[in-house]
Amino acid sequence: MVKSISTRYFNAVLAICLICTLFSACQEATKDTDKSEVVPNIVIIYADDLGYGDVGAYGAESLPTPHMDRLANGGVRFTNGYASSATCSPSRYALLTGRYPWRNDRAKILPGTAPLLIDTEEMTIPTMLKNKGYHTGIVGKWHLGLGTGSVDWNQRIAPGPNEVGFDYSYIMAATQDRVPTVYIENGNVVRLDSADPIEIDYQNNFPGQRTGKEDRESLRMNWHHGHNSSVVNGIPRIGYMKGGDSAKWVDENMADTFLVRAQQYIKRQADAPFFLYYALQQPHVPRTPHPRFIGSSGMGPRGDVIVEADWCIGQLIKTLESEGLMDNTLIILSSDNGPVLNDGYFDDAVEKLGDHTPAGGLRGGKYSLYEAGTRVPFVTYWKGTIEAKTSSAMISQIDLFSSLAALVDSELRGPDSQVLTDLLLGKRDQGREDLVLEATTRTAFRMGNWALIPPYPGRPVNTNVNIELGNSPDYQLFDLSSDLAQQENLAETQPEKLQEMIERFREIRGETGEVEALELK
Ligand code: NG6
Ligand code: CA
């Protein structure tokens, strides 16, 4: 009897032990699964007007970009990576929504007073990531419109980034060359004095306000074309601004200001998954390097601000390192459109260029339907997860939406966005088969190694910026595998390829693009 009780007791203890062991093994297994399911932080570093050839890793020999090179040479360096448009607002719209910019009539270069371009109901990368538990932030250039039509800059400005998915925003509204020249944090102008309210007008000047048209000699930076409205910090801008003196940014400090906000954001969010869209303002005009970068490139302000931007990227990486986040952060580096030298100010960009080739041998530049308009540096980096390689697979920024969604296990997809997650992570080399390219509302088409530009009227060259736009009365067809610089138009000698591409282009683009082109012709 005694024996049997003790045996029973022993058996019970054994059973409890077994259950405990199983339970803890089970817990371990769950832990493992959790570990493999940990989602990375995502940082998109997005330069403004940085050309394909402006980065060392993409062939720039005379411009030091060690930090961008570190990312490019330690991750996937895409050689066929595209911005969705050859100008800013449409590219940024497509990046965040995964939707082609030509589907939205308003997706053009926006004035500082434009209403928000993204519908607040529209799905965006930050909203998608928020749904998956991310904290989301934007620091830098916005240029996607604010408000619903007539913004009162002295109240909270909405809708804006915070209404389309960003938990935190610290932005400039449009561009460095457009008013209002102030920072906006979560919808409120920073350091605004209510006794000196801001007024903005893109049509008419305010009585008594100085503009760039008058006494040009006293300007700190002279304008070449456009940019002759209100003068802020001695630099003439696009659009008229009155008031808001205490809130006006100091151009030379902009890089540091954005960097510090981006670093603070990372430090604040280091404990939970975050998405940071770090939208650098360089090397867009006006190019105003901080004094410590003046002369750093030997190429004048354009080169100097690229060196400055590169330094900022280095500092951002340092913050990720010191927070112990490098192993768990996917970094994507790219640019919103191709390069331009003289974009409206006399700043020696042309004169001091030397033998540097911002477009890296591609034809055209910003505003162009030729390759340099949209083919940009495009890099993915994730320490310990992505192995270094170069990929020639075709990918567009428009694909980031669906690819990131798949990465974080979201079922959402952008309307024109393909799931190319494994390509982004360097595990596959299969990219897009085709892609519609856009430049100032005109569209062109890439398919395989071929590029097709439909006929467009208009000047072949924008002589202000000295860039070939891609306009021609005839179809242009290029075989990029043998003619990357798009020198030989094969439209006549390759009629079958031409027809095949026109048909596919029409299927995607609809008749509109073609009809518009023909009507204009
Ligand atoms: C153009 C400006 C140019 C630049 C561009 C927008 C003139 C003459 N030119 O209209 O300087 O601001 O818009 O650049 O005003 S983007 O990178 O933001 O698209
Ligand atoms: Ca741009």
Image (cartoon, helix red, strand yellow):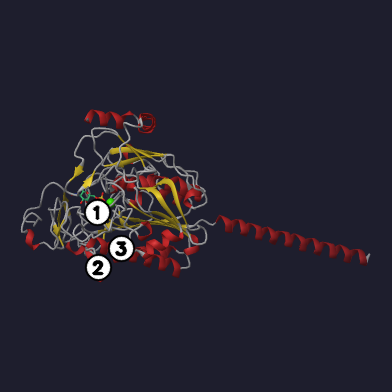
Disc 1/disc 2 C-alpha distance (Å): 18 Å
Residue at numbered disc 2: 290
- Identify the amino acid type marked 2: His
Which residue is pictured at 87% across the width and 62% down the height?
Answer: 8
Q: What element carries label 1?
A: loop
| Badge 2 element | loop
Left or right: where 269 falls relative to 224: right
Tag 1 residue: 175
Check disc 3 and report the residue beneath it.
Answer: 63
Badge 1 residue CB within 8 Å of ligand 1: yes
Q: Residue 489: where, in percent of width, then height?
A: 30, 37
Q: Nearer the viewer, residue 62 or 294?
A: 62
Q: Which amino acid does label 1 sit on?
A: Thr
Q: Earlier in the sequence, mark 3 or mark 2?
A: 3
Q: Indicate left or right for 135 with 511 as reference.
A: right
Mark whose residue sits in front, 1 or 2: 2
**What count of labels does the image hold?**
3
Q: Nearer the viewer, residue 358 or 219?
A: 358
**The N terminus: image quadrant:** bottom right
Tell me if mark 2 has few (under 14), some (14-19) or many (20+) residues whose alpha carbon lies within 10 angstroms of its own: some
